[in-house]
Image (cartoon, helix red, strand yellow):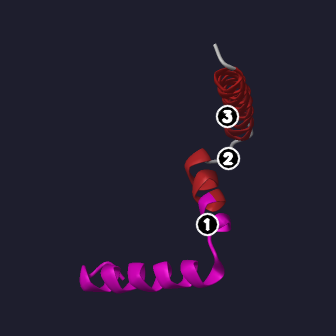
Amino acid sequence: MSDVEGVAQDQLKSIVERIERLEEEKKTIADDIKDVYAEAKGNGFDTKVLRKIIQIRKQDQNERAEQDAVLDLYMQALGMA
């Protein structure tokens, strides 16, 4: 094996190992989030609503306002408002 192939092989191995570590960290974080939702549910909170709140808080204020306006328009068109 030439030095170039060895370097590429080492780099590839390093990248794969980094991805594997990050995937494990992602799984750990997902498990932690699941535990927090379970705790919230145990304390009487509605987890569906909490998930919606988290989704809304991630949005830009203008994006959220636009979605709310479209939702209101659709609800009016369907006689729901």
Q: Which residue is mark 2?
A: 45
Mark 1 secondary-structure assignment? helix
Q: Which residue is mark 1?
A: 56
**Residue 50, image x, y percentages:** 64, 53
Could you classify mark 1 by the number of other residues whose Cα lies within 10 Å: few (under 14), some (14-19), or many (20 or more)?
few
Question: Looking at this rendering, what residue extends furthest in the front direction?
Answer: 2
Q: Are marks 3 and 2 in contact (CB under 8 Å)?
A: no
Could you classify mark 2 by the number of other residues whose Cα lies within 10 Å: few (under 14), some (14-19), or many (20 or more)?
few
**Residue 26, image x, y percentages:** 69, 33
- Amino acid type at image mark 1: Ile
Q: Earlier in the sequence, mark 3 or mark 2?
A: 3
**Residue 48, image x, y percentages:** 55, 49
* Location of residue 38 by image quarter: top right
Q: Are marks 2 and 1 in contact (CB under 8 Å)?
A: no
Q: Is residue 22 above or below residue 6?
A: below
- Amino acid type at image mark 2: Phe
Q: Which mark is residue 12?
A: none
Disc 1 to disc 3, C-alpha distance:
19 Å
The magenta span reads 55-81
Mark 3 secondary-structure assignment? helix
Mark 2 secondary-structure assignment? loop
User: Residue placed at 61% from the left, 48% from the top?
Assistant: 46
* Image quarter (top left, top right, bottom left or bottom right) of the N terminus: top right
Q: Is residue 2 above or below residue 35?
A: above
Q: Earlier in the sequence, mark 2 or mark 1?
A: 2
In the rendered view, does 21 fall on the left or right side of 67? right
* Image quarter (top left, top right, bottom left or bottom right) of the C terminus: bottom left
Q: Earlier in the sequence, mark 1 or mark 3?
A: 3
User: Residue placed at 69% from the left, 42% from the top?
Assistant: 44
**Residue 55, image x, y percentages:** 60, 60
Residue 41 falls inside the magenta stretch: no
